[in-house]
Image (tube, grey):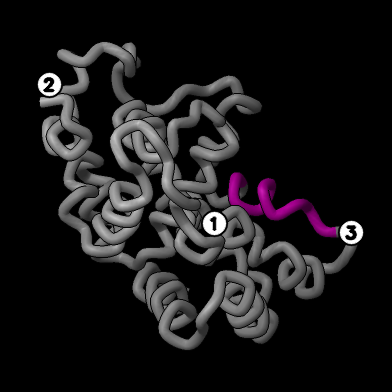
Amino acid sequence: MDIDGFWALIERSERETDTKRERVAWLEEHLFGLSVEEIVDFDVFWTIATNRACSWDMYALYRHMLSSYSSDGFEYFVNWLVGLGREAFETIADCPDRAVEVPQVRHVLELQRSAFNGSRRRREVWTEEEYPEFELLGYVTQDPYKRAAGENAISRGQAVVARGVEGKFPWFSFHTEPDGEGWDFEDRAEMVRRLPRTARWYGMA
């Protein structure tokens, strides 16, 4: 499997299904038909993609969208971004501040805005399907890899590392930090400087 094949599977899984659980099941079914080497390929490209999105500016975007500092939640947010497909993901990964320009992100932001009246929440912001986190998408190779590699094989993570790729998630467990320079997300002026489009969306600029 090459990088194009990886993204083709990610994008087709979205087109062929209606819910997150159906999407995971669709991917698992297709991964079960691959060799162990191809499954590890998928994991390698997944790891490269999520590593690319593990930055302090991306964490700031997550913080302001979901009002959370959760490191687990940040990982699941990045999973959701990968699930948006190649074009959307690469736009945001290269510049987290461009997220407000991506239609799928804009949609959830508009739902968020419509759910609030001033500081008072009128209704639930997002349904489960709309919620911008996708934990299960990060586990789709787990069972296919076990079946293809056998119970006594090295772990998926070890197989990826053996290819020369090390994951940054979960960064709180791996004693690593997101890329870039950390900053105070409550500093309004710094938010405007680093993420001006996001700051404007939230009325900070």
Of the residues shown, which amino acid type is indicated by label 2? Arg
Q: Magenta part mainly helix, strand or loop?
A: helix
Residue positioned 55% across, 61% down in the render = 128
Is 109 placed left or right of 63 in the picture?
Answer: left
Residue positioned 35% across, 31% down in the render = 119
x and y percent of residue 127 in the render? 51, 61
Range shown magenta:
153-161
Residue positioned 27% across, 54% down in the render = 110
**Residue at mark 3:** 152
Of the residues shown, which amino acid type is indicated by label 3? Asn
**Residue at mark 2:** 193
Residue positioned 17% across, 31% down in the render = 203
Q: Is residue 175 above or below residue 55?
A: above
Query: Label for residue 178?
Result: none
**Residue at mark 1:** 134
Distance between mark 1 and mark 2 Cα atoms: 29 Å
For label 1, the crowd category at 10 Å Cα-Cα, with few meaning under 14, some 14 to 19 and many 20 or more, is many
